[in-house]
Image: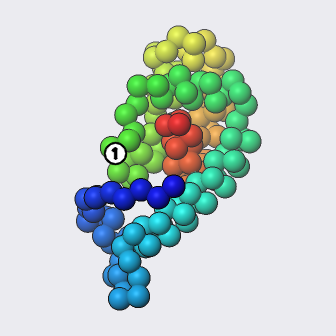
Amino acid sequence: MSKKASIYLGDRAETVIGEIKDSDSLSGRLNAIADRYGEIIDRARRQVLRNFSETELSAIRIACMSWATRQEPAGILIGGIAAEVEDALQGGDLSVQQWQPSDGKALLEKLNALSPAEQIALIEWLER
């Protein structure tokens, strides 16, 4: 379903979009970027979710429950999930705190090993 909307383009968006040629349109370029982003994130998310157990994913959700991500630039979000989980393990949410130290350490190692694209994919999963 197509939807017409007016949008504000920040400096970063204008840089990513680049120059619009006469044969292109802004909406066409934005749709191409969104399609590519969606493909990258969908593939990364499927791969990332396979690497975590249901218990680990539940702990990630609990630890990140109050973390406001929607308005933050991507560069600030990188490393954020691991930081939220570490905070929860060190005195935050009791259900995460009850983990064995080795379980928490293993989860943090997995999170810290994720690429930036995988971290953003996991954030997209959390936001849905």
Q: Position of residue 7 (x, y in %)?
A: 28, 58
Q: Position of residue 23 (x, y in %)?
A: 41, 88
Q: Position of residue 42 (x, y in %)?
A: 63, 53
Residue at image position (47%, 66%) is: 31
Q: Is residue 51 above or below residue 105?
A: below
Describe residue 90's horizontal placement relative to residue 17 as left or right: right
- Residue 119 visible to an observer of this rendering: no
Residue at image position (51%, 29%) is: 85
Describe residue 105's horizontal placement relative to residue 72 as left or right: right
Describe residue 92's horizontal placement relative to residue 9 as left or right: right
Residue at image position (66%, 28%) is: 56
Q: Count residues near mark 1 (Cα–Cα under 10 Å), then give few for <14, some for 14-19, many for 20+.
A: few
Q: Secondary structure at mark 1?
A: loop
As rendered, which of 106 and 41 lies closer to the eye? 41
- Residue 13 visible to an observer of this rendering: yes
Q: Circle 1 sits on which residue?
A: 72
